[in-house]
Image (spheres, grey):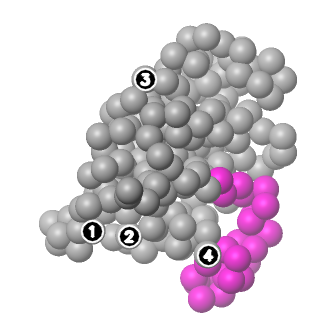
Amino acid sequence: MTAPYRVVAVSGSLHEPSKTTALLRAISAAVAERVDVDVHLIELTRIGPGLAGALRREDLLSGVEEELRAIEDADLLVVGSPVYRASFTGLFKHLFDFIGQYSLAGKPVLLAATGGGERHALIIEHQLRPLFGFFQALTLPIGVYASDTDFDGYEISSEALRERIALAAERALPLIGYAAVADPRAVAAF
């Protein structure tokens, strides 16, 4: 039997409870329904204070360094942020500032975001996708956006959102296996 795939979900939310974190949990659970995975959730509400004031990776606390290694070693990243001033949260970007430039090369990344209304949905295309393009990551063509109307409190209430989550999880499956066997040095060479 092969080891479970490593799925790392990164929530850029600065609040708990969080609709963004709830969305990432739902996406990770949908992937776990389809393939054997170990899911690890990283919440900025928990590690954010360890990022504050750090200018170099060696300045970070050991717990934050472990989370960075989890991101770099994942077979699939599920990343999401609430829309904050037309982009992802600054602390979310600060976390990824510490990731090695080629550490995510060829790694599949499922992009997600939450916002107050449907007009914020383009955050996936105009903010998140370029960030992970810099890392030469393999962003999935389908992202998952959820607005406030898709939730009842912090629980997903929209059947359409559940269907988007299922579709995104299904389309991620072939790429999870790719990342587990790909040599990131070969991808980074281009």
- Please tell me which of labels 1 and 2 falls first in the chain: 2
How many angstroms separate mark 3 from mark 2 (CA)? Answer: 27 Å
- Badge 3 amino acid: Leu
* Image quadrant in which the C terminus is located: bottom left
- Please tell me which of labels 1 and 4 falls first in the chain: 4
Q: Which residue is mark 4?
A: 66
- Tag 4 near tag 2, CB within 8 Å: no
| The disc label shown at residue 184, or none | 1
Q: Is residue 44 magenta?
A: yes
Q: Is residue 104 magenta?
A: no
Q: Does residue 148 lie above or below 17 as drawn? A: above
- Badge 1 amino acid: Pro
- Badge 2 amino acid: Ser
Q: Which residue is mark 2?
A: 103
Question: Does residue 117 appear to the left or right of 77 in the view shown?
Answer: right
Residue extent of the magenta highlight: 41-65
Pinpoint residue 2: horizontal percent, then vertical percent: 38, 58
